[in-house]
Image: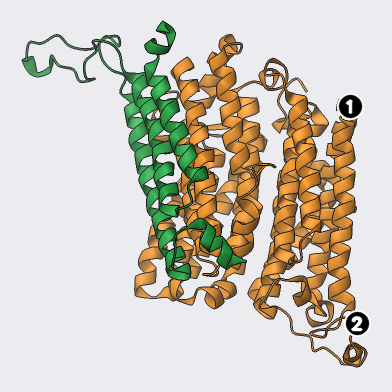
Amino acid sequence: MIGPEQYPAVMIVVPLLAAFAINLAGLIDRRFCYPLLLLALGVAAAAALAVLGQVMRDGPISYRLGGWPPPMGIEYVVDHLNGLVLVVTCVVAFLAAVYSKRSVERELPDKIPYFYTLFILAVTGLLGMTITGDAFNLYVLMEITALTNYALIAAGRADRAPMASFTYIIIGTIGASFYLLGVGHLYIMTGSLNMADLRTILPELYTTHAVIASFIILLLGLWIKMAFFPLHGWLPNAYTHAPTATGCLIAPLVTKVSVYIMARLMFSVYSPEFSYRVFGPAEPVVWMAVAAIVAGSLMALAQKDFKKMLTYLIVAEVGYMVGGLWLANRYGITGAVLHIVNDALMTLCLFFTAGIVVYKMKGHAFTDLRGLFRKMPLTMAAFTVGALSMIGVPPTAGFFSKWYLLLGAIEAGQWGFMAALLFSSLINAVLFFKVIEIAYFEPCGVQHGHDGGQAAAHDVIAVDEAPFSMLAPLVLVSAALLAIGIYSGSLVTNIIQYAVPAGF
Amino acid sequence: MEDILARYNYWIYVLLMMIGLYAMIAKNNLYKKVIGMSIFQTAIIVFYVSIAAKEGATIPIIQGAHGAGLVPAIDPAVYVNPLPHVLMLTAIVVGVSTLGVALAVILRIYRQYGTVEEDRILEKLR
């Protein structure tokens, strides 16, 4: 039997093998694919929870793949920071998988086995990126994630999705290549690829040009991968035109895992002292985050399409997390880590809603949202929780991470960042109340302001809820948003405060 | 000048990288963009492989084994660092996969629009 010490490997190996199993099972009968997917992701989620429990009890875990000791062998390292990210990734992936059934059957009926194979490979890549303690291994897993993402996105509507995917391939490859180049610089200087090993060797070399250059190159690569403004160009189209199930998986996870990788580099490969002091321009990065938040919010405001609006909000949210990490104080880092969790769930909630709208109304423009509160009361109630969380209304989760970020901004004296956070909340309020207004007050299928509108408004719109497999994950996520909001204090004291590097 | 010549491997990789980047950004034909992407990735492979080289070093295999009577290359200064080569095997695989996905996507684009020129596709997208 596999003991608890093997759980870090189980988390990666089970989804990886399940990818093959799903593909083969699809040859026999494609009805096997979906249960296999759920089973594998369920096992991974259970392993992730168990590992996080172990970390909370006994401290960080190091797992040697094949028994080879680091720095020669590849090691998996789980501490409080990535333990939390692993659990979030697994849970989000599981919920997205449950949700995907109906939409995949509708949108990609001929390709179910291939779609689910890619789906679970993408999850494997994301989990591997999060868990690995080896800089080069991270590159390989980053590319596994990216390659599956390209294919998952290209499976969308034939008139738009392939072109969006192609842009993503070109830009994503530039990002990954920059990351690889940065790792190469580190390897030249240290002769090591293990993160913990790099951390001990690097301090003597912090002032050398090659190490500083490597940090800049790595950051550039990751910023492209996380769509940090102004390097976000690939994201909105790719996520808008992707199939519903793809959007629900990658929109919440890919950018957040990339932000985690940046935190890992700043704290565990380089030291916080290097990132904030020796390297120098911490303040300009915060201003870049300000630009990301403001630009993301404004571009979201300009959209006429619900799903596209959400993608620009992701760009703004990336600014929150990058800015929080670069505030260089405990509140900022706590806020950023908490926001990784919250934003993954909020984005999931909103993309679930968008997916249900697509499923029921066959479109995702604002005009497709009319009358939905009467048609699908539960869906829209859950959506409202997600929307309130994006705005940052207590007691939803979004309020608390924003609160920490604001405290961090005040402590660091970064008034620009504080103003940007408040501005973004305001824009979010405008955006989501606009959506809620359309869905609540405008009658279904009738042009606003026409004579017929009055008569139609009195017609009773029959309740026509989303199918259970779509509705249940959505309701669970919105409940989780409330629960994390209410228990965010204990989340911070039990997990996140240990994730903040010592000395803050 | 001597500095530049002594590090010619870096200049080559930077040059290749810029050629690739130029093609990816400036070219209108999607295939040319993909070729640029491949050049870009190859530049980094050149970079890695070149840093492993040492003057007068041999291959990283113990030559004196099995009683052949040759000098064994056990001292790290005598043999070429094999690790970057091994890393680049993985990077080459990644590059090939990216190329495959990119070409498959271009095929889908061609079937949809009947062209692989970016400006014409963008015209049709409007």
Colour used to depict chain B in the structure image: green
Q: Residue at x 26, y 14 (%)?
A: B79
Q: Residues within 10 Å of mark 1 (few under 14, many from 20)?
A: few
Q: Which residue corresponds to mark 1?
A: A413
- Residue A284 falls in image quadrant: top right
Give above or below for B104 relative to B2. Answer: below
Res. A497 in view: no
Q: Which residue corresponds to mark 2?
A: A449
Residue A187 location, x and y as percent? 46, 21
- Residue B60 falls in image quadrant: top left
Q: Amino acid at mark 2?
A: Gly
Q: Amino acid at mark 1?
A: Gly
Picture quarter with the N terminus of chain B: top left
In the image, taking residue A201 as reference, residue B52 lies left or right, namely: left
Picture quarter with the C terminus of chain B: bottom right
Q: Residues within 10 Å of mark 2 (few under 14, many from 20)?
A: few
Q: Work out whether mark 1 precedes mark 2 in sequence or the reverse, and give the earlier one.
A: 1
The way the protein has been coloured in the rendering is by chain
In the image, taking residue A259 as reference, residue A465 lies left or right, namely: right
Which residue is outermost to the left? B68
Which residue is outermost to the top? B2
